[in-house]
Image (cartoon, grey):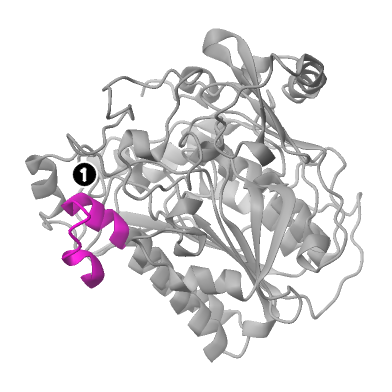
Amino acid sequence: MHCFSSWGQTNRDSNRPNIILIYADDLGRGLLSGEGQGIIKTPHIDQLAQEGMRFENAYGSMLCAPARASLITGYHDAHGDRWRITQGGIYKKISTGEMTQDAIETMVNEQIGSIPEEEVFLPQVLREAGYTTGEIGKLEWGFATTDQEMKRHGWDYYYGYLDHERCHGFYPPFLFEDGHLIEIEGNTLVNCGKSIEHETPEAYAERWNMEGKAQYSQNLFLEKILDFIRDNKDQPFFLYHPTQLPHGPVSIPEVAEEYLHDDRLTPIEKEYASMVKMLDDHVGIIMAELKALGIDDNTMVIFTSDNGHEIYYSQEGRILKPVRNMQTGKFFDDVNTKYYSELAGDVFDGNDGMAGVKRSNWEGGVRVPLIARWPGKIKAGASSEALVTNYDFMATMADLVGSALPPNKDGLSYLPELLGKKVEEHDYIVYSSFMGPALVTNEGWKIRYFSKKDLYQLYYLPDDYREENNIIAMNPEKAEELKKPLIEECEGDLDNGLFQNNKSIVTYPSH
């Protein structure tokens, strides 16, 4: 067992709350009706905000794997050497008969390499504070992980995928539970039912051909979540649910009744709306279970997303992917022109009016919903302007359970903010992207670096929510002031803040 007694624990307390983290996938905050979504209704997630605190300035990462790594380690994603992101897709070789589970895990573990004894992970912190830890859903780490790594991170129990590419389908022929391969009866497709992403008659027919698609993954996860809560209701637990929803390609067992006849939506948009609704429905079922078991008041529930909005419902004449200006047919240059929902044809405005989508260093790619509810401790209906980020979550949980963290972590605890007290706020937060890194200060200044053009842009977000006005020419001193910490956080190399598949993802040798 990995112990961190050398840097200490304090304030052990038997009355600490259960913790549930629901981590949505590619859910731009504009998809929540509580944030102004006009088509999709999310009453259960909205109720979390009504009974707890919502954050206005919460940031994730710009992509799935870096977001999860930041969450689990407490480091931002613009470092050069904090983790190794392994390539996805390898676990498909079990279905094709090319490799065994043992052979795959050996290969992935070799690519991951040894994990330093002194390194500390989120579930490890909570387990060593007396919590039972469970992870149910999409994989916890990288694009592929293993039983060995999951246990090293500190999970007492896990159920779900270990491979990111398999998560792109919702009908897996097998999942993993505590290292054991669990076959899913009636699911027979090697690609887990992943469909063609661009909408065509062929794509529609493929989505609704249900041969080999007997059991939908999210329903399996919900059953395991409820079992975990019931099994651990009498002791402190930490449950992490990284859901697949509403990541695409679009897939849903049936279209929700309220969207069937909605003339505002194309068929694939109706299906996508139904995916968001299912996520909300599952949140409602989890909350109802907490109440039924009598542990609602002693459970902190946190809802957030890994990154900003993404388009999975493209259709000729409606919205196209890669996204472009539907009025001109031209791609955005991300210097003078950029994605906005009304230009791209996004009926849902999933990025809540901000510029950009997933993978970008515009606000729409990285600013996410964050809601926390803990009856009697977090004030109902509260709203926070504090600058927080996903790499703060580890520090916040350590603060909650009275554990100290190693000093090299990047996050700060926002527990005081949740409890209505003064919080030690970041001077700035930093994140990577496929465009390059960016830095946002607690005053609202933002400097973004666009690697392709080797240029900086400066924005003042309190007056420019949509990032329409690059004011670097008028504020050269401010720009120089912010360049310095941005470069320092990238460890002297801005390329560390440029996510590139061929550089950032560790690939496997041919087999």
Q: Amino acid at mark 1?
A: Ser
Quick check: is 400 in the magenta stretch?
no
Using the rendered view, name the quadrant where residue 21 is placed. bottom right
Per the rendered image, the range of residues in magenta is 257-274
Q: Quadrant of the C terminus?
A: top left
Which residue appears at 61% of the width and 36% of the height?
A: 464
Please indicate, yes or no, whether residue 46 appears anywhere in the rendered image.
yes
Q: Position of residue 151 (x, y in %)?
A: 61, 53
Q: Position of residue 210 (x, y in %)?
A: 13, 58
Please indicate, yes or no, whether residue 173 appears anywhere in the rendered image.
no
Residue ranking furthest to the top: 454
Using the rendered view, name the quadrant where residue 444 is placed. top right
Q: Is residue 94 left or right of residue 26?
A: left
Q: Quadrant of the N terminus?
A: bottom right
Residue 190, above or below 137: above
Predominant SS of the magenta segment: helix
Q: Position of residue 427 (x, y in %)?
A: 82, 38
Q: Position of residue 53 (x, y in %)?
A: 67, 66
Residue 176, above or below 454: below
Which residue appears at 38% of the width and 60% of the height?
A: 38
Residue 274, above or below 438: below
Using the rendered view, name the quadrant where residue 483 is placed. top right
Residue on which disc 1 sits? 195
Q: Circle 1 sits in a helix, a strand or a loop, which is it?
A: loop
Crowdedness of circle 1 by 10 Å Cα count: few (<14), some, many (20+)?
many
Which residue appears at 91% of the width and 55% of the height?
A: 8
Which of the two residues, 149 or 389, is positioned nearer the viewer here?
Answer: 389
